[in-house]
Image (spheres, grey):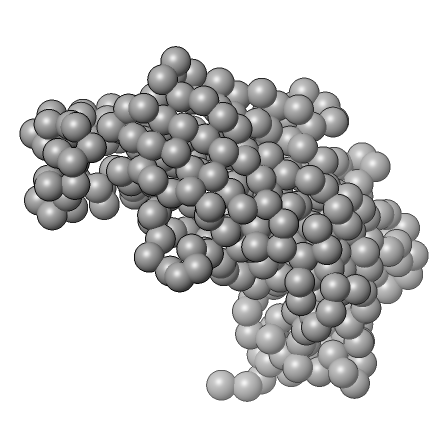
Amino acid sequence: MSNPQSPQNQSAVPTGKGSSASSEAQTTAAQAILEDVQKARLSTRLRETGTKSALVSAFGEDPQAYSSGLAKQLAELSARQRTPAAIPVKKQPSRLAATLDGLAGFFGPWNTIVAPNATVALVQTPSSTNTSGAIGGEIYTGDIALEGQVYNGDAQEQWWVNTWQYIIPLPIFSSNPGSLAYRFNVGASVGLYRQDFLTGSVHIYATVATTNDLASQPIDFSQPVSSTFAIAADLPTRAVPPIVDGNAKITGSIALAAGKTPAIGIVIGVIFSVAKGNLQIIPGEYSFVWLTNPDATTNGDIGKIEYRHDPFFWVEAVTRKLAYQP
């Protein structure tokens, strides 16, 4: 298919629509993921200082001061008090889910639904005066077309974070509600026009939260059911042409409530870091984040996710059958 179209202080601007509690939950979740990414990046860069000395010197920096700065940032970040992880939402046992998936062609076929367009949720940029630029994206059906250019004059990486939100209502089942399985892919690609910098990284992820009653229990991203990276790559990339891509396969299920509207919430997160230089994204067909159904083959599949209704009696029957097997 082709595209139809830090430890340092940060400036975070929640811009998505919805309650302040929802926006705060999204910001908190995004910050937790950012801190995990930052820790991993700092650890990696510390391990590489011995092999990067000549490169650091070529960028006009003192290798020893560079290494000390990394160690200090990692220590400060590791010392921060993190909010305890949310209690995980109960999901179907993997064996039951796999069995229901295998029998879907006979009893409960997969259906597709088109996701509403995403909305911008968070834009976070470095507060350092030695940085400039921004990352953004044009929004289409199931497609965020990435674009932007950023600069950091410091030897320590600064971070740009953007998130977009999808809220996808699913069909209501008034009787024999059972469960609703869902599946979709998040495909991502970033083409780089300029990557003349010391170090950097790109991470693109999808966080999913669900509800079985959208009207009275809105999506709460402080209680996610999954968070998966489509891209987690160091930069500059050595690929020719300089394109980084990846794919995340998302599956899950929702325990239905009779007569209520189930829904899936998806946060797409994009994180860039850059040290000592410029990064510019090639806009257009090489830079995007897509939602698609798992067997997508054409542009017409962009924006589609799949769902399957498993009635209560059917879930119970399969559960009992599995209980008698070793």
Please state, as top left, top right, bottom left or bottom right, where the N terminus lies in the image: bottom right
Taking the image as shown, residue 266 lies to the left or right of residue 261, namely left
> For residue 286, what is the image quadrant?
bottom right
Taking the image as shown, residue 238 lies to the left or right of residue 176, namely left
Percent coordinates x, y for residue 124 in the rendering: 51, 25
Percent coordinates x, y for residue 79 in the rendering: 25, 25
Residue depicted at 86% across the width and 56% down the height: 171
Taking the image as shown, residue 165 lies to the left or right of residue 175, namely left
Residue depicted at 16% across the width and 36% down the height: 58
Instruction: Tell me: residue 262, above or below residue 307.
Output: above
Q: Answer whether residue 149 is visible to the viewer in this image.
A: yes
Percent coordinates x, y for residue 15 in the rendering: 66, 24
Which residue occupies the foreground of this view, 1 or 209? 1
> For residue 300, what is the image quadrant?
bottom right
Which residue occupies the foreground of this view, 324 or 181? 181
Q: Answer whether residue 266 is visible to the viewer in this image.
A: no
Instruction: Tell me: residue 259, above or below residue 297.
Output: above
